[in-house]
Structures are given as C-alpha cells and as structure tokens.
Image (cartoon, grey):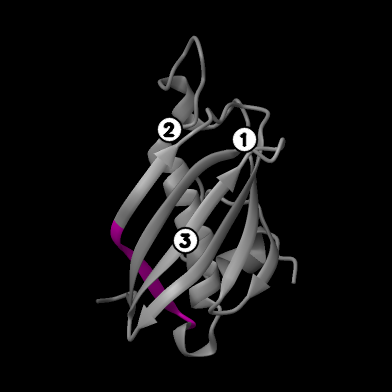
Amino acid sequence: MKMGIKEIQQIIPHRHPFLLIDTIEELEPGVRAVGYKCITYDEPQFAGHFPQEPVMPGVLMIEALAQVGAVAILSVEENRGKTAYFAGINNAKFKQKIIPGDRIRLECEIIKQKGPIGVGKAVAKNQDGKVAVMAELTFAIGSADA
C-alpha cells in the first residue's frame, strides 16, 4: 500500500514543518511500515546545522523513524484518531551522515506491544543501502486530548 502526504496526514497528526516522511511504500497495519524522506537543502534545520556543512540532526532522523512507526501502529482500526507518543529511545546508533540530496529509507517493525505500550525496531538507510541510524523506539498510544 503506497501512501502520499495526504494519506499519511489522515493517520498521524504531524504537519509541516514537522512531518518528516514523504511517502509510505509498504504497510502492514500494526506490524511494520517502510517510508521515504527526500532530504532537501531548504529544510529549516540546515540554516543552523551546520551552515558550512549541512547535516540532518540525529534527533530528527529518530523522529522520522518514529513517524513511520506511528503510521504502522495507528493504521490499526482501533488506534485510528489516536496519537503515538514517545516513551523511550534505546540503543540509538548513528552510523552515516544524512545530508541534502539523500533519499532515506525508513523502516519500523513493531516487535512488542502490550496494551497501549509498544516497541518498534527502527532502521534508516541511505540510498546506497548503508545503515545511517538504528534504534529501538518505545511508544505509548493515547488519545489526542489526553
């Protein structure tokens, strides 16, 4: 199932400039999702990180992975309209720089879930297939008004 920005925005609450995924290319609701982000020079973070050598901040790469995981978990019917909040980040490793011009493959597989708490195994790869970022992301599902 391929999704563009409009379809993604029907599942997760993120909006510009904080929607950090462009497409979802694969989706197994509640199980896994694969998305892509095309990194462009005109994104706001590059004005200060770093002006002479733009590098995508690691925390934004983790957030992009979490958004893909949120699409996976919130696409399950009983989670529609809810929000997946960060509850933890474990074993994060940054192996490659992400720079403007890169097209990043973002994959998150839900490896544990008990009630509203779950864990996703997340990996971001650059267009050469090299692992750029990996982490275990813990989430808590809650209503948007909680």
Report if the CB atoms under discs 2 and 1 are less than 8 Å apart. no
* Residue 20 visible somewhere in the drawing: yes
How far from the left and from the top, in percent, is residue 78? 47, 90
Q: CA distance from mark 2 to mark 3?
A: 20 Å
How far from the left and from the top, in percent, is residue 113? 39, 79
* Residue 18 visible somewhere in the drawing: no
Left or right: where 61 falls relative to 59: right
Residue reaching furthest left?
146
Q: CA distance from mark 1 to mark 3?
A: 22 Å
Q: Secondary structure at mark 2?
A: loop
User: Which labelled disc corresponds to residue 57?
Assistant: 2
Residue receiving disc 3: 121
Left or right: where 18 falls relative to 28: left
Residue type for callout 3: Lys
How far from the left and from the top, in percent, is residue 2? 75, 66
Magenta-tinted stretch: 80-88
Residue type for callout 2: Pro
Q: Residue at x 53, y 61 (%)?
A: 108
User: Within the magenta stretch, is there residue 53?
Assistant: no
Q: Residues within 10 Å of mark 2 (few under 14, many from 20)?
A: some
How far from the left and from the top, in percent, is residue 128? 72, 35
Residue type for callout 1: Ile
Q: Secondary structure at mark 3?
A: strand
Q: Residues within 10 Å of mark 1 (few under 14, many from 20)?
A: some
Q: Residue at x 54, y 32 (%)?
A: 43
User: Which labelled disc corresponds to residue 39?
Assistant: 1
Magenta stretch, main secondary structure, is strand
Q: Nearer the viewer, mark 1 or mark 3?
A: 3
